[in-house]
Amino acid sequence: MKKLFVFIFFMLFSIRLFSNQNITCNEQKLRVVLLELITSDIYSTGLLIQKTLKNNMKYFKLEHLSKNAINTFLSKTQKRNNKISYCFISKNYKIFFHSYNYKVKSTILDFKFYNKVLKNLYQKALLRFNLYYEVIIPVCLNRAKKVFIHIGFKTGLIDEYLKKVIEK
Protein backbone atom coordinates (compact mmCIF):
# COMPACT_ATOMS: atom_id res chain seq x y z
CA MET A 1 0.00 0.00 0.00
CA LYS A 2 2.87 2.36 0.83
CA LYS A 3 4.46 1.63 -2.55
CA LEU A 4 1.20 2.63 -4.21
CA PHE A 5 1.11 5.97 -2.40
CA VAL A 6 4.80 6.66 -3.07
CA PHE A 7 4.27 5.87 -6.75
CA ILE A 8 1.18 8.08 -6.91
CA PHE A 9 2.96 10.88 -5.04
CA PHE A 10 5.80 10.88 -7.57
CA MET A 11 3.32 10.71 -10.45
CA LEU A 12 1.46 13.72 -9.07
CA PHE A 13 4.70 15.60 -8.40
CA SER A 14 5.93 14.89 -11.94
CA ILE A 15 2.66 15.93 -13.50
CA ARG A 16 2.63 19.20 -11.56
CA LEU A 17 6.31 19.91 -12.16
CA PHE A 18 6.61 19.15 -15.86
CA SER A 19 3.19 20.02 -17.20
CA ASN A 20 2.02 23.39 -18.45
CA GLN A 21 -1.57 22.19 -18.47
CA ASN A 22 -4.09 23.17 -15.84
CA ILE A 23 -4.51 21.18 -12.62
CA THR A 24 -7.88 19.80 -13.69
CA CYS A 25 -6.28 17.98 -16.61
CA ASN A 26 -3.53 16.63 -14.33
CA GLU A 27 -6.08 15.49 -11.79
CA GLN A 28 -7.93 13.66 -14.55
CA LYS A 29 -4.72 11.90 -15.60
CA LEU A 30 -4.10 10.87 -12.02
CA ARG A 31 -7.66 9.54 -11.76
CA VAL A 32 -7.00 7.33 -14.78
CA VAL A 33 -3.78 6.02 -13.21
CA LEU A 34 -5.56 5.37 -9.90
CA LEU A 35 -8.39 3.55 -11.65
CA GLU A 36 -5.86 1.34 -13.45
CA LEU A 37 -3.99 0.57 -10.21
CA ILE A 38 -7.15 -0.24 -8.26
CA THR A 39 -8.50 -2.33 -11.15
CA SER A 40 -5.25 -4.31 -11.29
CA ASP A 41 -5.47 -5.01 -7.56
CA ILE A 42 -9.10 -6.10 -7.86
CA TYR A 43 -8.26 -8.23 -10.91
CA SER A 44 -5.56 -10.10 -8.98
CA THR A 45 -8.14 -10.88 -6.28
CA GLY A 46 -10.49 -12.05 -9.04
CA LEU A 47 -7.83 -14.41 -10.36
CA LEU A 48 -7.60 -16.01 -6.91
CA ILE A 49 -11.38 -16.53 -6.93
CA GLN A 50 -11.18 -17.83 -10.50
CA LYS A 51 -8.50 -20.40 -9.61
CA THR A 52 -10.46 -21.61 -6.60
CA LEU A 53 -13.65 -21.89 -8.63
CA LYS A 54 -11.95 -23.71 -11.52
CA ASN A 55 -10.43 -26.24 -9.13
CA ASN A 56 -13.84 -26.96 -7.60
CA MET A 57 -15.63 -27.07 -10.96
CA LYS A 58 -13.29 -29.81 -12.21
CA TYR A 59 -15.12 -32.19 -9.89
CA PHE A 60 -18.58 -30.64 -9.36
CA LYS A 61 -21.08 -28.65 -11.38
CA LEU A 62 -21.62 -25.10 -10.22
CA GLU A 63 -25.07 -26.00 -8.94
CA HIS A 64 -23.61 -28.72 -6.70
CA LEU A 65 -20.94 -26.63 -5.00
CA SER A 66 -21.54 -25.75 -1.36
CA LYS A 67 -23.29 -22.39 -1.34
CA ASN A 68 -22.31 -21.78 2.25
CA ALA A 69 -18.61 -22.51 1.61
CA ILE A 70 -18.36 -20.39 -1.57
CA ASN A 71 -20.38 -17.50 -0.07
CA THR A 72 -18.12 -17.56 3.00
CA PHE A 73 -15.03 -17.62 0.76
CA LEU A 74 -16.33 -14.59 -1.18
CA SER A 75 -17.21 -12.76 2.03
CA LYS A 76 -13.77 -13.37 3.53
CA THR A 77 -12.09 -12.36 0.27
CA GLN A 78 -14.07 -9.12 0.29
CA LYS A 79 -13.13 -8.39 3.90
CA ARG A 80 -9.42 -9.01 3.23
CA ASN A 81 -9.35 -6.37 0.49
CA ASN A 82 -10.83 -3.13 1.83
CA LYS A 83 -11.28 -1.79 -1.71
CA ILE A 84 -13.91 -4.41 -2.56
CA SER A 85 -17.56 -3.51 -1.91
CA TYR A 86 -19.03 -6.80 -3.14
CA CYS A 87 -18.23 -9.89 -5.17
CA PHE A 88 -20.44 -12.49 -6.73
CA ILE A 89 -20.48 -15.34 -9.22
CA SER A 90 -23.12 -15.48 -11.94
CA LYS A 91 -24.30 -17.91 -14.57
CA ASN A 92 -26.94 -17.11 -17.16
CA TYR A 93 -27.60 -13.75 -15.45
CA LYS A 94 -28.43 -15.42 -12.12
CA ILE A 95 -26.35 -14.89 -9.01
CA PHE A 96 -25.24 -18.26 -7.64
CA PHE A 97 -22.84 -17.07 -4.95
CA HIS A 98 -22.45 -13.65 -3.33
CA SER A 99 -20.40 -12.07 -0.56
CA TYR A 100 -23.78 -11.02 0.88
CA ASN A 101 -25.88 -14.18 1.37
CA TYR A 102 -29.21 -12.42 0.90
CA LYS A 103 -28.28 -11.57 -2.72
CA VAL A 104 -27.92 -15.23 -3.76
CA LYS A 105 -30.52 -16.32 -6.33
CA SER A 106 -31.03 -12.71 -7.44
CA THR A 107 -31.09 -11.95 -11.13
CA ILE A 108 -28.88 -9.47 -12.92
CA LEU A 109 -31.33 -6.83 -14.07
CA ASP A 110 -29.77 -5.24 -17.14
CA PHE A 111 -29.55 -8.27 -19.46
CA LYS A 112 -28.99 -6.31 -22.68
CA PHE A 113 -26.10 -4.31 -21.28
CA TYR A 114 -24.43 -7.33 -19.71
CA ASN A 115 -25.03 -9.46 -22.78
CA LYS A 116 -23.02 -7.09 -24.98
CA VAL A 117 -20.10 -7.22 -22.56
CA LEU A 118 -20.15 -10.88 -21.53
CA LYS A 119 -20.71 -12.24 -25.02
CA ASN A 120 -17.14 -11.52 -26.15
CA LEU A 121 -15.36 -11.41 -22.79
CA TYR A 122 -12.21 -13.52 -22.62
CA GLN A 123 -10.01 -11.84 -20.01
CA LYS A 124 -11.69 -9.07 -18.02
CA ALA A 125 -13.98 -6.09 -18.33
CA LEU A 126 -14.42 -2.94 -16.29
CA LEU A 127 -17.93 -1.49 -16.15
CA ARG A 128 -19.41 1.44 -14.28
CA PHE A 129 -22.80 1.23 -12.59
CA ASN A 130 -23.90 4.39 -10.81
CA LEU A 131 -21.73 4.45 -7.66
CA TYR A 132 -19.67 1.36 -8.45
CA TYR A 133 -17.08 0.07 -10.87
CA GLU A 134 -17.28 -3.65 -11.53
CA VAL A 135 -14.48 -5.90 -12.73
CA ILE A 136 -15.86 -8.97 -14.50
CA ILE A 137 -13.71 -12.05 -15.08
CA PRO A 138 -14.88 -15.14 -17.01
CA VAL A 139 -14.28 -18.66 -15.73
CA CYS A 140 -13.69 -20.93 -18.71
CA LEU A 141 -13.67 -24.70 -18.56
CA ASN A 142 -13.08 -26.76 -21.69
CA ARG A 143 -12.98 -23.49 -23.68
CA ALA A 144 -16.57 -22.72 -22.73
CA LYS A 145 -17.49 -19.70 -20.60
CA LYS A 146 -19.43 -21.21 -17.76
CA VAL A 147 -19.63 -18.47 -15.17
CA PHE A 148 -18.50 -14.93 -14.44
CA ILE A 149 -16.90 -13.40 -11.37
CA HIS A 150 -18.06 -9.85 -10.57
CA ILE A 151 -16.10 -7.69 -8.14
CA GLY A 152 -17.35 -4.21 -7.35
CA PHE A 153 -15.72 -1.19 -5.77
CA LYS A 154 -17.04 2.29 -5.07
CA THR A 155 -16.32 5.06 -7.55
CA GLY A 156 -15.63 7.29 -4.54
CA LEU A 157 -12.57 5.17 -3.75
CA ILE A 158 -10.63 7.05 -6.43
CA ASP A 159 -11.56 10.37 -4.82
CA GLU A 160 -10.41 9.07 -1.43
CA TYR A 161 -7.00 8.06 -2.79
CA LEU A 162 -6.69 11.27 -4.78
CA LYS A 163 -7.39 13.29 -1.65
CA LYS A 164 -4.73 11.35 0.30
CA VAL A 165 -2.17 11.94 -2.45
CA ILE A 166 -2.89 15.66 -2.72
CA GLU A 167 -2.72 16.09 1.07
CA LYS A 168 0.77 14.55 1.15
Image (spheres, helix red, strand yellow):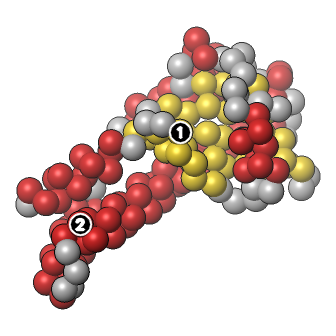
Quadrant (top left/top right/bottom left/bottom right) for the C terminus = bottom left
Q: Is residue 123 above or below residue 99?
A: below
Residue 148, quarter of the rendered image:
top right
> In terms of sequence position, does the residue under pointer 1 or pointer 2 come before the other?
2
* Relative to 135, 56 lies left or right: right
Q: Nearer the viewer, residue 105 or 156?
A: 156
C-alpha gap between disc 1 and disc 2: 24 Å
Q: Is residue 154 above or below residue 66?
A: below
* Relative to 109, 100 lies left or right: left
Image mark for residue 10: none
Residue 20 in percent (x, y) is at 19, 86
Residue 39 in percent (x, y) is at 47, 55
Residue 118 in percent (x, y) is at 76, 48
Residue 56 in percent (x, y) is at 76, 36
Please identify the residue farthest to the left as the structure is shown: 168
Image mark for residue 129: 1
Disc 1 residue type? Phe
Circle 1/circle 2 CB separation < 8 Å:
no
Q: Residue at x 23, y 55 (%)?
A: 162
Q: Residue at x 86, y 30 (%)?
A: 61
Please identify the residue farthest to the top as the structure is shown: 102
**Residue that mark 2 sits on:** 24
| Foreground label between 1 and 2 | 2
Q: Residue at x 70, y 32 (%)?
A: 110
Q: Residues within 10 Å of mark 1 (few under 14, many from 20)?
A: few
